Image: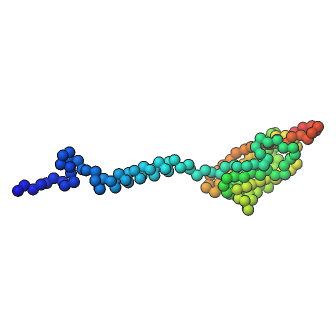
Amino acid sequence: MPVDTRDPTECTRCRRTPRGPVARPRSLIIVTVWLAVIVCAATPARAHSKLLQSVPADRSVVGESPSRVRLSFNERIEPAYAELSVWVDGGKQVDTGDVTVDPANPVAMSVGLGKLPPGRYTVRYRVVSVDGHVVKGSLTFTVKPPQGGKRTP
């Protein structure tokens, strides 16, 4: 009697391996890997520090000189690398240089100001967020002259 040498998992009609229990786990693995790739790609990357608020606000006009400029970020900043300065339109730095990151609120930093004359001021900042990325930017505010007063540079 002849011995049957055909593979028992092979289909006798079309000579292909059937989609049975062996094929399902492989398909499940492939689908799972693709879903993981899609989900990871669709998830936004962790954002770096972002300026949430400033006092005075960006492009604001204030009636009198503020005593400090305060910035608040969306995540903790590294105090050792925090930079904050205020410049008058003519290019002169006018802050007191006492940049501080609030120990009780490590997302906030400030710098002191003397009495500022009316004019336009630029606030420049540079921070390192806890994830190690450098974030820098600038904003402006204007101190308006008193009612009936003259504008001084």
Name the one closer to the observer, 80 or 20.
20
| Quadrant assignment for the N terminus | bottom left
**Residue visible at 28% across and 53% down in the picture:** 20
Is residue 92 found left or right of 35 in the rendered image?
Answer: right
Q: Would residue 97 be visible to someone looking at this image?
A: no
**Horizontal and vertical percent position of residue 133:** 62, 52
- What number of labels is visible? 0
Q: Residue furthest bottom?
A: 104
Seen at 71% across and 59% down, the residue is 106
- Residue at 38% from the left image edge and 51% from the top image edge: 30
Where, quadrant-wise, is the C terminus in this rendering? top right
Percent across and percent down for residue 33 are 42, 52
Q: Quadrant of the rendered structure where residue 142 is?
A: top right
Which residue is most to the left? Answer: 1
**Residue extending furthest right?**
148
Examine the rendered structure and indicate whether residue 51 appears above or below residue 104. above
Rendering coords of residue 87 (x, y %): 79, 44
- Asked whether residue 131 appears in the rendered view, the answer is yes
In the foreground, 136 or 48: 48
**Toward which corner of the image does residue 82 lie, by quadrant?**
bottom right
Identify whether 100 is placed above or below 150. Answer: below
> Which of the colour schemes (rainbow, by chain, secondary structure, one colour) is used?
rainbow
Residue 16 shown left or right of residue 85 in the figure: left
Percent across and percent down for residue 21 are 29, 56
